[in-house]
Each structure stands twice: as structure tokens, then as C-alpha cells.
């Protein structure tokens, strides 16, 4: 069975490219499983500090595989093997950057929203069109979209099934930057490389603290932030960062 994605190791950054062009990178069980496996490999590799995910110029991922979905009844959905893959993708603790060109619809939009930073080409389209099939988002779309773009925009996108373009997505807070389509991956990699140059433990705890802000009340989030801040006081990278600042040189972070 051919692999449905490719992986390039670029120093401290891994670039994962979805490769199912005949289906516009529709997320079937195999593709999701391969992605979860590759993120697990990146998680375990101390040399990998950031991962970038992208698709093709035409589609990041145009949704779930409808033909595969049609074969599953209620019991099949309850026992859907893709759920385990989604859980592994969600649990990835290192920074994840998505470079989105073309369609990011349904499961593709949900996958993009798993990323910590989204860079979109000007031709990108984001949407949750599941309502057109008599269903609804089922891989976090309703929850992550509302947190990303607010109630009104999320309601409109999910209940009408109509997509938004890259500029609308940026204005709503779904993506951080919009680029020319031919520069999307290049810009995502540049951001990833800049993050990779930072202290890994600080990056990991900062990401976790930011995600806490979505999932908990302010007081609990502030307690976590202070605890993480205090833990970093015991790291070698903190000492190196302060010394480098004082000596007016670039720091050399090791992850210790």
C-alpha cells in the first residue's frame, strides 16, 4: 500500500506533506494513521523541534473521505478507528505549523485547526460543509472553530456550510498570516525555523500555557503560567539566554 504523505527533515524542522492528490488529500483512515505515526516519530526525536504540515497547491485537505464514511453505520462510527489518530494528533506537544493552500474543508479545516500557527495562501478556503450531507463536524470542528473565530462566524460557517476565504479567516483570527500561494510553505518553514532556534522547554511550556487559556478559567490559567515560569528558572537554557543577552550574542539553546 503506497504511503499517502512524505516527510522531509530540515535540521530541527520536519515538513510533512499530504500526498493523496487524486482525492484532494481527503483524510481517509490510512492518511490520518500515517500522519499520527509521523507526529509520534517527531515527538520522540529530540532533534525535531517544530513540525510543518502542508498539502498541495490545490488542496490542503478537502475533507474526510466520504466514500469511506458512507460504509460506516452508527456502530461503525462509534468504533471509528480514525478517532485514535485524531487523539494522537491532538496530543502532539511540540509546535505545529500548518501551511494551507486551496481547500481546507471539513476534516481538512479541523486538521488545520489542530495546528498552533496557520499560514494561508491567498487562495485558501476554510469551511465546515458537513451540514450539506446531513451531518455535522465530528473531529473538533464545532469546538475549535468557535474558539478561533467567535460564535457568529462559527455558527454561520457550520450551519450554512459556506466557506470563508483567506482574508476573512485572517480577520476572524483563524490564521495569522496570508501569503502568495507559492510562498506559503516557505513562510511556514521560516516561522518554524525561528521557533526551533528558541529554548525547547520554554517553547513547550509556553505552548501548553497558551492552550490552557482556551480550556480553563483565568485563575487556573494564571496558576499554570506561574508554575511553568518558575520551572524554567531551573533550566540551563534560561541561564544561557540571560548570559547571551548580557554578552550581546546569540544564545545557544540545548534543551536542558
Image (cartoon, rainbow, N blue to C red):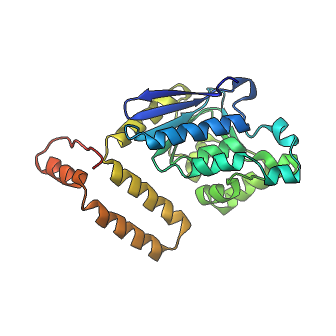
Quadrant of the snapshot with the N terminus: top right
> Is residue 55 toward the left or the right of residue 156 in the image?
left
Q: Residue furthest left?
A: 247
Q: Residue furthest bottom?
A: 219
> Is residue 211 toward the left or the right of residue 127 in the image?
left
117 vs 227, nearest the viewer: 227
- The answer to whether 237 is drawn above or below residue 197 in the figure is below
Picture quadrant where residue 112 is located: top right
Whether residue 132 appears in this view of the structure is yes
- The answer to whether 215 is drawn above or below residue 30 in the figure is below
Q: How many marks?
A: 0
Task: Give x and y (percent) for residue 177.
Answer: 50, 41
Residue located at (59% from left, 48% from top): 88
Task: Give x and y (percent) for residue 176.
Answer: 50, 46
Task: Give x and y (percent) for residue 244.
Answer: 16, 47
- The answer to whether 220 is drawn above or below residue 146 in the figure is below
Residue located at (45% from left, 70% from top): 221
Residue located at (25% from left, 56% from top): 235
Task: Give x and y (percent) for residue 234.
Answer: 24, 61
Picture quadrant where residue 181 is located: top right
> Is residue 81 toward the left or the right of residue 15 in the image?
right
245 vs 74, nearest the viewer: 74
> Is residue 243 toward the left or the right of residue 57 in the image?
left
Amino acid at each position: 500500500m503506497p504511503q499517502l504523505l512524505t516527510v522531509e527533515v530540515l535540521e530541527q524542522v520536519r515538513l510533512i506533506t499530504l500526498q493523496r492528490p487524486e482525492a484532494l488529500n481527503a483524510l481517509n483512515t490510512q492518511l490520518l494513521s500515517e500522519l499520527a505515526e509521523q507526529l509520534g516519530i517527531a515527538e520522540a526525536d529530540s532533534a525535531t523541534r517544530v513540525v510543518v504540515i502542508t498539502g498541495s497547491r490545490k488542496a490542503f485537505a478537502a475533507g474526510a473521505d466520504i466514500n469511506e464514511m458512507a460504509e460506516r453505520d452508527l456502530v461503525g462510527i462509534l468504533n471509528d478507528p480514525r478517532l485514535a489518530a485524531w487523539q494522537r494528533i491532538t496530543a502532539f506537544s511540540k509546535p505545529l505549523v500548518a501551511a494551507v493552500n486551496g481547500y481546507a474543508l471539513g476534516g481538512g479545516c479541523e486538521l488545520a485547526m489542530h495546528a498552533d500557527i496557520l499560514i494561508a495562501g491567498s487562495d485558501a478556503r476554510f469551511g465546515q460543509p458537513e451540514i450539506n450531507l446531513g451531518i455535522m463536524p465530528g473531529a473538533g470542528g464545532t469546538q475549535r472553530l468557535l474558539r478561533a473565530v467567535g460564535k457568529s462566524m462559527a455558527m454561520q460557517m457550520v450551519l450554512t456550510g459556506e466557506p470563508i476565504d483567506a482574508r476573512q479567516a485572517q480577520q476572524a483570527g483563524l490564521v495569522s498570516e496570508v501569503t502568495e500561494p507559492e510562498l506559503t510553505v516557505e513562510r511556514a518553514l521560516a516561522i518554524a525555523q525561528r521557533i526551533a532556534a528558541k529554548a525547547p522547554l520554554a517553547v513547550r511550556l509556553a505552548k501548553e500555557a497558551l492552550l490552557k487559556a482556551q480550556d480553563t478559567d483565568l485563575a487556573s490559567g494564571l496558576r499554570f503560567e506561574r508554575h511553568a515560569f518558575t520551572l524554567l528558572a531551573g533550566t540551563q537554557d534560561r541561564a544561557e539566554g540571560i548570559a547571551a543577552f548580557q554578552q550581546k550574542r546569540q544564545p545557544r539553546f540545548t534543551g536542558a
